Amino acid sequence: MERAASDQLVDHRGVWERKPVLRLVYDDFYDRIAAACRRGRTIEIGGGIGNLKQRLTEVVATDIQSAPWLDCVADAQRLPFADACAANIVMVDVLHHLEFPLVFFREAARVMRPGGRVLMVEPAITWGSTAFYRLFHHEPVRTSADVLADGSPDPRRDPYDSNQAIPTLIATSDRERFHRLVPTLRIAGVQWFALAAYPLSGGFQPWSLIGEGAARRLLRLERALEPALGRLTGFRMLLTVEKAADSGTAARCVN
């Protein structure tokens, strides 16, 4: 079901345009995604306010809500693309909103060409971030949920419903189950990052506890500290899921 751009989407676009520290922090997200992309067509899911498309080439930007800056309306759990047509599927803050992540990953396996990647920047539930997300963030953290349950997505469901624990559970305790349920996909890597600049920026809230210059310096420092501290205190993760390579011929993409 097509949805018009929501007030929240419009508000987020306004905050983005007014808040340089937010753009700086998200540029770090986009740089990580761009560095991990395969060469070829990229499908962005949850294109939202349309920022990532400015950083990547050959991008088809989609969202479950329509907006003038997007290419098409699509539900991540029922993608309107041909088999084996994409080198990458990229998402920022989408996975933890999906009703049935397993349904999405099966669709991703269908749409991606052999060797293709799903690249997702998502909340990371770590020792350092858990209290912040539980106490100060409006989205719930349900670590007891069955995040790989199967089912039929409800088209009437609010697309902003969420569980911030979904990506972390898939990357950790549910990893082997994920591999069994979607055998053509494997979790190829997890980067745990965003130690301080991201939470201090306030995200899409109108406030920030850090200026642009300080955030720039802090982001450089964080890159050096991530290998030691990311898994313990990171607020974000880059989850990379890769489709197994085979001798099949990729179909031409339809969009």
Image (cartoon, rainbow, N blue to C red):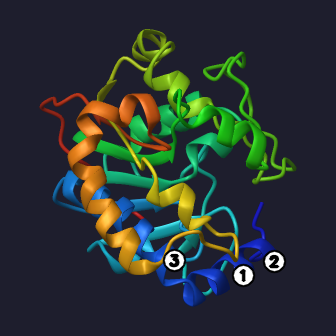
- Whether residue 59 is visible to the viewer of this picture, yes or no, is no
Q: Specify the amino acid type for callout 2.
A: Asp
Instruction: Name the residue located 61 percent from the left edge and 60 percent from the top edge.
Output: 74
Residue 145 rendering spot, x and y as whole percentages: 72, 19
Give neighbour class at mark 2: few <14, some 14-19, many 20+ (Cα, 10 Å). few
Q: Which mark is residue 7?
A: 2
Residue 196 rendering spot, x and y as whole percentages: 46, 52
SS at circle 2: helix
Give neighbour class at mark 3: few <14, some 14-19, many 20+ (Cα, 10 Å). some
Q: Is the residue under label 1 in contact with that under label 3 (CB below 8 Å)? A: no
Residue 216 rendering spot, x and y as whole percentages: 33, 71
The CA span between labels 1 and 2 is: 5 Å
Residue 33 rendering spot, x and y as whole percentages: 31, 56
Q: Specify the amino acid type for callout 1.
A: Val
Q: Is the residue under label 2 in contact with that under label 1 (CB below 8 Å)? A: yes
Mark 3 vs 1, N-terminal side: 1
Tell me where residue 114 sits by quadrant.
Answer: top left
Residue pointed to by mark 3: 50
SS at circle 1: helix
In this orientation, which residue lies closer to the viewer: 64 or 252? 64
Residue pointed to by mark 1: 10
Tell me where residue 129 sits by quadrant.
Answer: top right
Give neighbour class at mark 1: few <14, some 14-19, many 20+ (Cα, 10 Å). some
Farthest-out residue, left = 247
Q: Is residue 247 above or below residue 145?
A: below
The CA span between labels 2 and 3 is: 15 Å
